[in-house]
């Protein structure tokens, strides 16, 4: 098959690094363009772990040039910045997989938590895709809104039970994440002395990802879903564990239900015991488990927040978008020990 030229805008951060690591060995995608806001460097200078592995130049973002040499661009950029780049690329016929929040929500929800949306035309046709939940919806798309990490883990735990739980009763989600989810730029809240030997909740209930969970869970079951979402920062580099607590209205065996729901889904592994985040580290796997106590349901999902929560899921979506096998170039071997 003919190679497909791809690029990364926003290559400096952790998700950009993970994309580079996968794309340089992808059998079809040919990484030809890497950019950030400054340029004048190389991938190996930005990410010293790639010295002798990838020596591609990193250019200052120039949309016209990117569109001339790329069929598809991954945007690993902050919100608002991403939509500005996406609009120019889409106008020039380049396909886009956006890792930011810019196309994940409807305009009302987006503007309530982020900023004024500047690309409503493209927002209307953006495809939101967790492949196990949305199938091949991304195939042939021009623009994919790659879901967030908290939302991916939460929805993969919750989705099998949407028809079995009482939506009039509270749904609680406790999601613990590694520090890399805060990004590469240092801040006081992710300083070593703030994180080490510590665990803390942040933005409880009002976290903007709660709205993303609610919007897309509601879409999956054609019913209004409301959640109480509590994220926590834990002292580890990477990994995420989302635990969902809900009330069953229908008799079921939760684990059997999960096994049936995710049958033939290669990147979701149904565990017979609660998963550990280390089991998925460095991979696209989502490890899920569920049990019940009477009508009280506990469902959980462990992922790598940088991989399944961002970069590897973006690559799976890109594979589907371009009509390829979804597993091409996707890591399966966990970082263990």
Image (cartoon, rainbow, N blue to C red):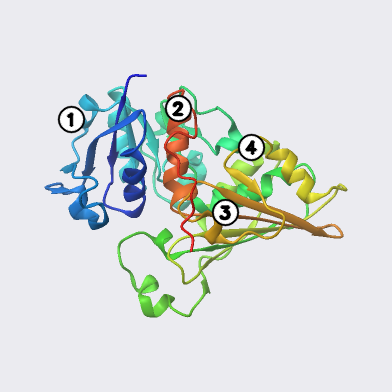
Q: Disc 3 on helix, strand or loop?
A: helix
- In the image, 122: left or right of 304? left
Residue 315 image offset from top left, x and y in percent: 42, 38
Residue sitting nearer the eye, 109 or 267: 267
Marks 4 and 3 in Cβ contact (< 8 Å):
no
* Of pointers 4 and 3, the one earlier in the residue sequence: 3
Q: Tell me what residue is drawn at x 50 percent, y 32 percent.
A: 326
Q: CA distance from mark 4 to mark 2?
A: 21 Å
- In the image, 315: left or right of 214? left
Can the viewer see residue 167? no
| For discs 2 and 3, the disc positioned in front in the rendered view | 2
Q: CA distance from mark 2 to mark 3?
A: 27 Å
Residue sitting nearer the eye, 41 or 159: 41
Using a 10 Å C-alpha cutoff, classify the residue at mark 2 as few (fewer than 14 neighbours), some (14 to 19) or many (20 or more): many
Q: Disc 2 on helix, strand or loop?
A: helix
Q: CA distance from mark 1 to mark 2?
A: 22 Å
Q: What label does residue 321 carry, if any?
A: 2
* Of pointers 1 and 4, the one earlier in the residue sequence: 1
What residue is pinned by disc 1? 65
Q: Is residue 97 positioned above or below 52 on the image?
A: above
* Of pointers 4 and 2, the one earlier in the residue sequence: 4
Q: Tell me what residue is drawn at x 36 percent, y 28 percent.
A: 28
What residue is pinned by disc 3? 210
Q: Tell me what residue is drawn at x 18 percent, y 54 percent.
A: 45
What residue is pinned by disc 4? 219
């Amino acid at each position: 098959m003919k190679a497909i030229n791809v690029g990364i805008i926003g290559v400096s951060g952790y998700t950009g690094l993970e994309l580079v690591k996968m794309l340089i060995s992808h059998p079809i995608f040919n990484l030809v363009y890497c950019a950030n806001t400054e340029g004048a460097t190389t991938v190996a200078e930005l990410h010293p772990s790639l010295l002798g592995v990838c020596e591609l130049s990193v250019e200052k973002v120039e949309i016209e040039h990117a569109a001339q040499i790329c069929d598809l661009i991954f945007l690993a950029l902050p919100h608002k910045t991403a939509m500005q780049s996406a609009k120019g690329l889409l106008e020039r016929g380049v396909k886009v997989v956006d890792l930011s929040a810019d196309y994940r929500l409807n305009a009302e929800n987006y503007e309530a938590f982020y900023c004024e949306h500047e690309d409503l035309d493209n927002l209307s046709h953006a495809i939101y895709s967790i492949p196990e939940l949305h199938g091949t919806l991304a195939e042939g798309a021009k623009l994919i809104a790659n879901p967030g990490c908290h939302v991916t883990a939460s929805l993969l735990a919750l989705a099998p039970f949407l028809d079995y739980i009482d939506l009039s009763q509270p749904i609680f989600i406790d999601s613990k994440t590694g520090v890399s989810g805060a990004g590469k730029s240092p801040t006081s809240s992710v300083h070593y002395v703030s994180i080490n030997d510590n665990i803390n909740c942040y933005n409880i209930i009002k976290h903007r990802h709660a709205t993303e969970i609610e919007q897309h869970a509601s879409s999956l079951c054609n019913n209004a879903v409301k959640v109480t979402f509590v994220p926590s920062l834990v002292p580890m580099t990477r990994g995420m564990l989302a635990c969902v607590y809900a009330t069953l209205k229908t008799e079921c065996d939760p684990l059997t239900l999960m096994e049936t729901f995710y049958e033939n889904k290669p990147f979701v592994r149904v565990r017979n015991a609660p998963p550990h985040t280390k089991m998925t580290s460095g991979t696209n796997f989502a490890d899920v488990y569920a049990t019940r106590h009477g009508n009280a349901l506990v469902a959980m999902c462990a992922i790598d927040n940088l991989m399944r929560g961002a970069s590897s899921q973006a690559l799976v979506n890109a594979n589907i978008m371009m009509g390829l096998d979804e597993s091409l170039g996707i890591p399966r071997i966990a970082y263990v020990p």
